[in-house]
Image (cartoon, grey):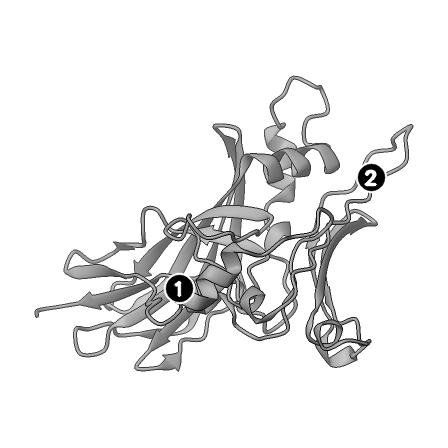
Amino acid sequence: MTTADKSRAIVRTDYRNGDMHHCHESPRGDRSSLRVSKLRLPPREPRPRPLPIVRIRNCMVGLATLLATSLACMGSVGAHPHVFIDADAALIFGESGKLEAVRVSWTYDEFFSLMMIEDAQFDTDGNGTPEPARLQAFAGHDVDWEAGFPGHIVAKQDGNPVRLGPPKSHEARYASGKIVTSHIRPLEHPIAVTTADPLLLRIYDPEYFIAYANPRGPWVEGRNDCKVTRRPPDISGQKELLDALQDLEMQSDSISVMNMPDVGITFSEGFEIACGAR
């Protein structure tokens, strides 16, 4: 086995028993590097043809592949995620003035929306529009993570993680050819957000299976004295790696190779939220 074979991990997506699975596995057979995350879809109705199996694999070899590009702002670099999501976040403050929850909205790209509509049979009458009742039945299944998974939203204060509870209050809708889902992540303990102790928020996929863009940035609900500052990624000193990424030749049947934790943070945007008098 070559050094490249030892260093790479294959990400697969397939559908089994009505569930959508993302499987990250090492060619070495190392159980410690195997992780499966599952998106549960509503039960299928019987079909005359075999159930579709979608298998997408990505084999990019080399250190440069471990540093994928940023989402919207790194458009000149050859990143190759396969799900694209516009993410919104509303920071919900309670009557006490403390941050109590984050409402997250995901707008899936048109291709992945079509794939979900077809595989989950959201459009049973064939008119090209998902049925609202079936979409609402799907709500929450795209965030059915295993316990402890942060859910691609990371909040920190003074360098320490802010613990978020499991998602609740799920909704799903269809707009402009895209599926939009939302959920609320309550904080385990409300926190005070001040100019002295601001909050840093990121929405990103550490492994770049999903490319999150934050075109609007977070906003605040429940207070009118907070300022949100966008923190672009610092890519200084990364030119050689970015150039190498541009030169990558990707296999047609591939999706992602990486064996390094938290790769996506290298190019992810951060948002600083500070409240109160400055």
Does residue 63 appear left or right of residue 13 in this picture? left
Residue 89 in the image: above or below residue 264: above
Frontmost residue, 165 versus 177: 177
User: Which residue is drawn at the image coordinates 64% and 43% (left, top)?
Assistant: 138
Frontmost residue, 104 versus 59: 59
Number of residues whose C-alpha sits closer than 10 Å to that of mark 2, classed few (under 14), some (14–19) or many (20 or more): few
Expressed as whole percent of the image width and height from the top left, the position of residue 181 reads 52, 44
**Distance (Cα) linking label 1 and label 2:** 34 Å
Label 1 vs 2, first from the N-terminus: 2
Frontmost residue, 270 versus 99: 270
Amino acid type of the residue tagged 2 in the rendering: Pro
Expressed as whole percent of the image width and height from the top left, the position of residue 189 reads 39, 76
Residue underneath mark 1:
202
Secondary structure found at label 2: loop
Expressed as whole percent of the image width and height from the top left, the position of residue 108 reads 53, 42
Amino acid type of the residue tagged 1 in the rendering: Arg
Q: In what quadrant of the picture does the C terminus appear?
A: bottom left
Inspect this view and state whether residue 204 appears: no
Q: In what quadrant of the picture does the N terminus appear?
A: bottom right
User: Which residue is drawn at the image coordinates 42% and 48% (left, top)?
Assistant: 75
User: Which residue is drawn at the image coordinates 57% and 71% (left, top)?
Assistant: 63
Residue underneath mark 2:
52
Frontmost residue, 149 versus 138: 149
Does residue 181 appear left or right of residue 34 in this picture? left
Expressed as whole percent of the image width and height from the top left, the position of residue 92 reads 32, 58
Does residue 123 appear left or right of residue 196 in this picture? right
Number of residues whose C-alpha sits closer than 10 Å to that of mark 1, classed few (under 14), some (14–19) or many (20 or more): many
Does residue 113 appear left or right of residue 156 in this picture? right
